[in-house]
């Protein structure tokens, strides 16, 4: 990946797709997309990322926040955070902001 592309990716601020419906199921969250008539069950980790994807935070910011919640350095969570964001994007739940 070129430095420019990597820099662009770092500045991306993922945002939850508008028009979704959320339903709590214990520690999980069911997210329904009326536009495609699909639903996805998110586990606790995915829910934490989902809730922080409000269009104001980069993956690094989200990782730092998760680290504060868990009492761990955010840098340790960055790879998992990026992976979680990518999965939510593939499911059509997030848009690049």
Image: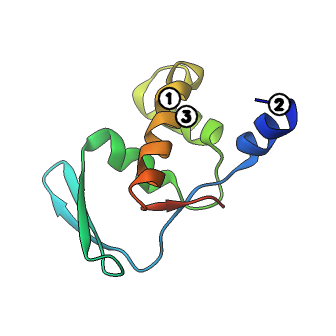
Picture residue at 43% right of the left edge, 34% below the top: 69
Q: Position of residue 68 (x, y in %)?
A: 50, 31
Is 41 or 72 nearer to us in this picture?
41
Picture residue at 18% right of the left edge, 48% below the top: 27
Left/right placement of residue 44 relative to residue 62 reads left
Is 52 or 20 nearer to us in this picture?
20
Q: Mark 2 points at which residue?
A: 2
Is 81 or 56 nearer to us in this picture?
81
Question: Dot 1: few (<14), some (14–19), or many (≥20) neighbours within 10 Å?
Answer: some
Q: Distance between the residues labelled 3 and 2?
A: 23 Å
Which quarter of the rendered picture does the N terminus lie within?
top right
Helix, strand, or loop for circle 2? loop
Name the residue at the right extreme. 4
Helix, strand, or loop for circle 1? helix
Label 3 or label 2, whichever comes before in sequence order: 2
Q: Position of residue 36 (x, y in %)?
A: 32, 76
Question: Dot 3: few (<14), some (14–19), or many (≥20) neighbours within 10 Å?
Answer: many
Which quarter of the rendered picture does the C terminus lie within?
bottom right
Q: Position of residue 49 (x, y in %)?
A: 44, 46
Q: Mark 1 points at which residue?
A: 67
Whether residues under marks 1 and 3 lie with C-beta atoms below 8 angstroms apart, the answer is yes
Q: Distance between the residues labelled 1 and 2?
A: 28 Å
């Amino acid at each position: 990946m070129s430095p420019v592309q990597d820099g662009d990716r770092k500045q991306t601020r993922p945002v939850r797709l508008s028009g979704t419906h959320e339903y709590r199921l214990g520690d999980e969250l069911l997210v329904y997309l009326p536009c495609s008539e699909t639903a996805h069950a998110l586990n606790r980790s995915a829910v934490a990322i989902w809730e922080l994807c409000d269009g104001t935070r980069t993956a690094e910011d989200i990782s730092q926040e998760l680290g504060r919640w868990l009492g761990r350095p955010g840098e340790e969570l960055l790879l998992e955070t990026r992976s979680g964001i990518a999965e939510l994007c593939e499911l059509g739940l997030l848009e690049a902001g």
